[in-house]
Amino acid sequence: MVLGLLRKTRSRPAPRAAAQERIHVVANRELPLRIVENDRAKRLTLRIDAGGRGLRVTVPPGLRQGEVDLFLDRHRHWLETRLAKLPDRPQVRPGVKIPLRGQPHLIVHEPGRRGTAVPGEQEGKPALIVHGERTHLPRRVADFLKREAKREIEPLVARHAASVGRPAKAVRFKDTSSRWGSCTSDGTLSFSWRIMMAPPAVIDYLVAHEVAHLREMNHGPDFWALCKELCPRTDEARAWLKRNGSALQAIDFG
């Protein structure tokens, strides 16, 4: 979600606004706010990170800090309205369900053993069994998803990269709030490990999307044609991620 406002022309340059991070309170939420100066920006833009996990304001050079504050105040209602439409941030804890490859798994805490998380069953239904101390449970679940991402995505990258004839320089996994994946000009691919909560077809699409950038560093017609060649279910997977991506980003592993 992005909101922009044209900046008024100044007769003389203003003090340069330094990039910074702070907490911004809106709709009874304390959200991380990142203010980024961009030499190419002609206006102020406001973005809500996926899942409502934070805010980002991009500003032109030479902007006074007070203008950022006024910009946020003027658009408080816009923020409140959109934040109210976002899904709640369910916290990872025993008794809740999180999806694994698109299938809901009940989180079950079984203390007394070495801290691990493994798939299993609870009353005949899929579960994620987490051992170790209760305080470490969210991190154990996150670590499990990271391992699963590495185990599944790296072979997918190798297969799709072989199809396009462009090897990836490296494959990395992060917990990004604004994008599901990225490809740098040197061929480094990055993926959000949260994608392991999506169905297999969506995981495959994301990998195909980023691998396609190894040949087409754009989103033009040739890129999408290549993406669909690698992943025939591209349109279906994109639609699923658009509908459900914010909910996955909203899950709190803290």
Image: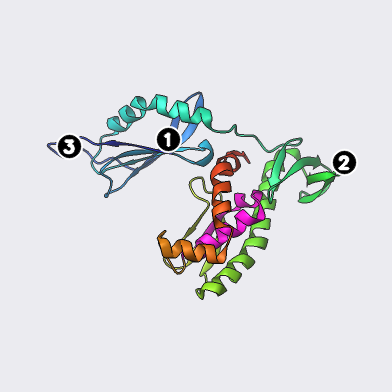
The percent position of residue 141, horizontal first and vertical second, equals 70, 46
Q: Which residue is mark 1?
A: 22
- Kind of element beneath mark 1: strand
Q: Residue at x 34, y 39 (%)?
A: 45
Residue at image mark 3: 9
**Residue 25 visible, this angle:** no
Where residue 120 appears, x then y in whole percent?
Answer: 82, 49
Q: Amino acid at mark 1?
A: Arg
Q: Earlier in the sequence, mark 3 or mark 2?
A: 3
Q: Name the one closer to the observer, 80 or 85.
A: 85
Quadrant of res 69? top left
In-image side of 84 versus 39 (left or right): right
- Label number found at residue 200: none
Question: What quarter of the picture does the N terminus occupy?
Answer: top left
**Answer yes or no: do the residues labelled 2 and 1 have beta carbons within 8 Å?**
no
What range is drawn magenta here? 189-213
- Disc 2 crowd, CA 10 A, few/some/many (<14, 14-19, 20+): few
Residue type (three-letter) at the residue carrying disc 2: Glu
Q: Pointer 3 and pointer 2: residues touching (CB < 8 Å)?
A: no
Q: Residue 208, position in %: x, y?
A: 55, 62
Residue pointed to by mark 2: 123
Q: Residue most toward the left? A: 11
